[in-house]
Image (cartoon, coloured by chain):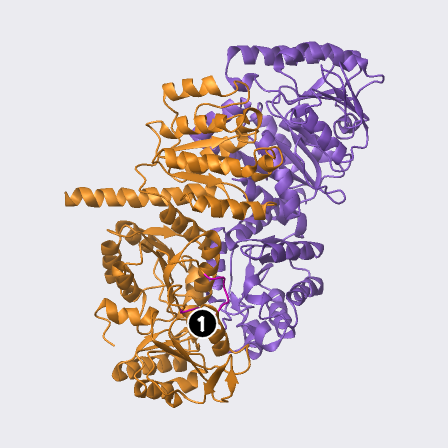
Chain colours: A orange, B purple
């Protein structure tokens, strides 16, 4: 397969036929898990099981070898011991296979000469046979639209998403897909490429750059083979789509571990940081930060600046939250400027004088509890519409609201946020701890998602996510200026 | 009241009689909320309601004024507008009241001359009458043992705890108490002192230092009146009990907000950091970090050093987690040293060669899924018993274990951890994301709490908490050395 064209690449995510090598009646075998997951995801192509012992499972025959399948195969998922794989490639070529995805490990990441040699031989043989490889040592592809799936049972994503994720680690791939879905991230495509002996991060980056389904690109990388080219590609991609990169192995011991994990070659974290920044990419340091940033890019419109307003005290006792929110924002490079004199004067006319704070942060002094929700809408609207403000963070302490607000209902608070989001154009972000109120938190998250309002569990995480979005749109503004 | 002796202070947390001023048949009024919470907490003393409109509620008469109560009162909780409070103090003196806790706001934190003057007058009058004040602008005292309670409904703590918490913010007080209980923190006593016009952080710090029920002290502060004395007291206290301090208003805008919140006077964050470090206190930067550190001190035994071992891959695909855990530990000042040659050789004899990592982190290559749990105990025991290791972190991905382990059950994995904890003396820490598996996560947290194993949701949070404990025991070792 050439992969010169987008259509070639589409075969990876929308294959017509897939064969899983290593399936068996034992449902715990990795090949069996792949088949179960593909079936559960409603894979839209034709699916074949291949396993040395034959038999039948899931209503499918298990073919004893690939060649026994009575039609050509586009895509093969390999989960058998490494020693059988070189011979399998001949079968693949005979069946017209285009892409071989290899779960099996024990290649260059083992650090042994034998593993390295085997990987070299695999790569060479695949090239000679015209086969493309994803892996080895990877969990492969996830595409909610086609039903291509990772070997982990997960809830089904509703509809098609706009987030692509490129990942060197199988565990992080599945964890990010699973956690992302639970957080409201909607994926276009996900790919885990492990040791990346053939297709690697740059190939997928280039494809996602032109994939019309993808608007945001996340990546977990432990190393890249061609650093300068990688940076050049990111710089091009970032002009139209945000690229968020989590670099694993940023410490010395982490880098040594990465080399045992995916045979990644270390380079200093400072070099990565500088290169990514210059290329306009967003650098994050953990799975949570990656999810937080992705969510912000998915939900928020273009952000014009870094000036944040904060609303706290909806349920009373908001002073501590005001201080904490301020500290969180400033420590992430955001500003929390005082509101305009006029805004403050108008706030003072609405809010109770004792127990409120008017500077920004604004402590609304339990106004929703004591005076009703329309008195909450007004100060929030005044605050976000202040000409010196770019983003509004709303502290929403569920446990302080749910009991006392039983009459109007907590949902009415959320309706107020949604109304505010519709009444003006600036982005809103909600901060709320899920602790003790997990069910209400999840319901809130889902409801606010409809209005493009992301929910974060702490001020620190919200502030960091907003700062990433601010950084990206600043880069875009500079690019646009250069071009003008 | 003198407060020179511990017994005097005990009256604050174990009063014989409490009157709440500002109670009414309207259950939304703050005074009414206090009474409901005290009743729900099973307050062990005698409780009286006082409100201008009189009447009856909760089966209690509402006295029209304090003097009408037919017995002496130890402790008064005040939730009426500020303008009535000076006169109330005369009633308090007449009834033999020792301590007046004031929820009402609008004093020095308002920034107005009137508010400042009123607070000065309040303080002077209370001193002349021999009354001690907690507040104003505070939510007061929580003591699970006596049923003294904050004005927020919360689940009841089982038994007496060892954690005291001193807090300048009412919101943070209630949030930390509520979140702490949910995380498994058990409190001895909690106090919110707001503007601290009389009793303040140093007073409570000195009391908790000698309180036999308290072993760990947490604090949220926005400012202190006598910095040098504060540092001196902490240095003395830290010799026997860990003191964890979250300083709010660490940024310029945060400090300005703090002054509107509790009239705190700002001093630079760098000065705080240096002073706290020198005094042997642990400095944290958020509610979550405070809870994480407190939990670590509550559960973990004395830690001898900063050398961490990491186990991942129980459910397979642990390589990415190994890298992430390594990066998290090193970035927090912990070490992840390679295991001894002998340990590594013995691990290699047990673990599958392909897909495992032996360096430390140790990726056990899904050994629990494929070979059974006794093969999990062995590598964990070898790793933690390595002479170069002080602490073991175990990555426990619930969603990767719960389905595949249906035969043995996920509980059997936790039993393995508990058995390991009993089989040797070094501390164990579990990292596990609650996302998608909140119910199982909570059950796990409770079960492991019995064996003194804390659970953190991310590597970053676990590593930070461990680093705090390491720092404290290093300080203690230096103190012990000086003394020897």
In the rendered structure, the answer to whether residue A473 lies left or right of residue A320 reads left
* Residue A123, percent from left and from top: 31, 79
Q: Is residue A289 placed above or below A1 in the rendered structure?
A: above
Magenta residues: mostly which secondary structure? loop
Determine the residue positioned at 56% across, 17% down. B106
Image label count? 1
Compare residues B65 and B182 and report the one nearer the observer. Answer: B65
Q: Which residues are magenta?
A: A148-156
Determine the residue positioned at 61% across, 42% down. B179
Q: Is residue B145 placed above or below A246 in the rendered structure?
A: above
Q: Is residue A303 placed above or below A377 in the rendered structure?
A: below
Residue A149 in magenta?
Answer: yes
Q: Secondary structure at mark 1?
A: helix
Q: Chain of mark 1?
A: A
- Specify whether residue B351 is in view: yes
Looking at the rendered image, the quarter that the N terminus of chain B falls into is top right
Please name the residue that numbered disc 1 is placed on.
A38
Q: Which image quarter: residue B391?
A: bottom right
Q: Is residue B238 placed above or below A234 in the rendered structure?
A: above
Compare residues A51 and B252 and report the one nearer the observer. Answer: A51
From this viewpoint, which residue is outermost toward the right?
Answer: B70
* Residue A315, percent from left and from top: 56, 31
In the rendered structure, the answer to whether residue A276 lies left or right of residue B224 reads left
In the rendered structure, the answer to whether residue B220 lies left or right of residue A44 reads right
* Residue B74, percent from left and from top: 79, 21
Residue B142 in magenta?
Answer: no
- Specify whether residue B219 is in view: no
Mark 1 burial class by Cα count in 10 Å: few <14, some 14-19, many 20+: many
* Residue A158, percent from left and from top: 43, 58
Looking at the rendered image, the quarter that the C terminus of chain B falls into is top right
């Amino acid at each position: 397969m050439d992969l010169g064209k987008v259509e070639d690449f589409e075969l990876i995510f929308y294959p017509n036929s897939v064969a899983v090598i290593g399936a068996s009646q034992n449902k715990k075998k990795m090949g069996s898990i792949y088949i179960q997951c593909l079936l559960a995801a409603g894979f839209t192509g034709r699916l074949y099981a291949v396993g040395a012992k034959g038999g039948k499972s899931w209503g499918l025959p298990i073919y004893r070898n690939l060649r026994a399948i009575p039609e050509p195969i586009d895509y093969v998922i390999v989960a058998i011991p490494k020693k059988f794989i070189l011979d399998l490639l001949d079968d693949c070529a005979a069946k017209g296979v285009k892409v071989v995805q290899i779960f099996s490990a024990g290649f260059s990441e083992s650090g042994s000469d034998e593993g390295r040699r085997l990987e070299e031989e695999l790569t060479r043989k695949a090239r000679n046979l015209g086969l493309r490889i994803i892996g080895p040592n990877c969990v492969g592809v996830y595409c909610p639209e086609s039903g291509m799936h990772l070997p982990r049972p997960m809830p089904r994503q509703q509809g098609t998403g706009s987030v692509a994720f490129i990942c060197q680690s199988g565990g992080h791939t599945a964890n990010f897909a699973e956690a992302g879905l639970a957080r409201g991230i909607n994926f276009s495509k996900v790919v885990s490429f492990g040791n990346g002996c053939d297709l690697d991060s740059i190939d997928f980056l280039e494809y996602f750059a032109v994939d019309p389904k993808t608007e945001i690109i996340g990546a977990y990388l432990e190393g890249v083979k061609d650093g300068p080219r990688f940076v050049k590609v990111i710089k091009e991609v970032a002009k139209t789509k945000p690229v968020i990169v989590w670099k694993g192995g940023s410490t010395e011991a982490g880098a040594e571990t990465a080399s045992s994990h995916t045979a990644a070659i270390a380079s200093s974290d400072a070099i990565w940081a500088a290169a990514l920044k210059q290329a306009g990419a967003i650098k994050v340091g953990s799975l949570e930060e990656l999810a937080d940033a992705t969510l912000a890019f998915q939900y928020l419109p273009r952000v014009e600046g870094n000036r944040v307003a904060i609303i706290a005290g909806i349920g009373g006792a908001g002073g501590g939250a005001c201080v904490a929110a301020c500290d969180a924002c400033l420590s992430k490079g955001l500003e929390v400027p005082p509101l305009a004199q006029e805004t403050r004067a108008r706030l003072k006319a609405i809010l109770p004088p004792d127990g409120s704070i008017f500077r920004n942060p604004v402590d609304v002094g339990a106004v929703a509890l004591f005076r009703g929700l329309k008195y909450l809408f007004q100060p929030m609207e005044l605050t976000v519409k202040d000409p010196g403000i770019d983003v509004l963070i709303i502290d929403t302490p569920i446990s302080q609201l749910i009991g006392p607000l039983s009459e109007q209902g907590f949902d009415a608070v959320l309706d107020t946020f949604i109304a505010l989001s519709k009444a003006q154009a600036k982005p809103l972000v909600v901060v709320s701890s899920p602790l003790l109120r997990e069910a209400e938190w999840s319901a809130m998250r889902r409801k606010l998602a409809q209005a493009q309002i992301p929910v974060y569990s702490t001020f620190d995480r919200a502030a960091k996510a907003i700062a990433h979005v601010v950084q990206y749109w600043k880069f875009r503004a500079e690019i646009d200026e250069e071009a003008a």
